[in-house]
Image (cartoon, helix red, strand yellow):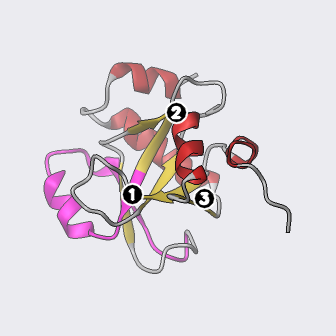
Amino acid sequence: MVDVPPEAAIRATIRPGSVYYFVEESFKSTEPHYFIVINNKPLEDKVVLLVCASSQIDKVRQRRKTCPEETLVYIDPTRYSDFSGDSIVDCNSIHEKTVEQLVDKLARDELRLKSEMDVSLIEQFRQGVLTSHLIEHRIKKSLQR
């Protein structure tokens, strides 16, 4: 097997629905999470917009109980086979990373590339972000391009 440089690996695979598995420094948890790219053109944008999946469904629902229901997207393993159990994606929180930050994580062996998510799920995430009262207007605007 040929070793692909980290930058080439990210640049060749990043698209709406790309999934990365890594530890997010801003989280209290030191466990890696699944992050899903929702930009229409992540290589052309200044930052990659990511939503995060959690297996702690009740905790997320409780934390977001005042948010519209469509901002929380439930996913079971039949909809995304890399998940071993039921998960929820909180579209009320966006994580912004540069392509360079993702490349750096991959170079340091701190990021795993996962199988791509179906575009129908990505559309649900985008709709959830657009519906959210907690997401900045500039992010919503970038998703509508």
Q: Is residue 71 magenta?
A: yes
Label pair 3/2, CB-CB below 8 angstroms: no
Horizontal side, residue 120 vs residue 69: left or right: right
Q: Of label 2 and label 1, which has the lower sequence position?
A: 1
Q: Is residue 9 left or right of residue 26?
A: right
Q: Residues within 10 Å of mark 2 (few under 14, many from 20)?
A: some
Q: Residue shown at 58%/52% (left/top)?
A: 106
Q: Is residue 129 above or below residue 29?
A: above
Mark 1 Cα shell of 10 Å, populated few (<14), some (14-19), many (≥20): some
Q: Which residues are magenta?
A: 52-79
Front residue of 33/144: it is 33
The numbered mark at residue 23 is: 1
Find disc 3 in the rendering and name its residue: 117
Where does residue 112 sit, x and y in percent of width and height?
A: 57, 62
Residue 91 can be seen in this image: yes
Q: Work out whether residue 80 or residue 66 is closer to the camera in this orientation and state it.
A: 80
Q: Amino acid at mark 1?
A: Val
- Mark 2 lies on residue: 98
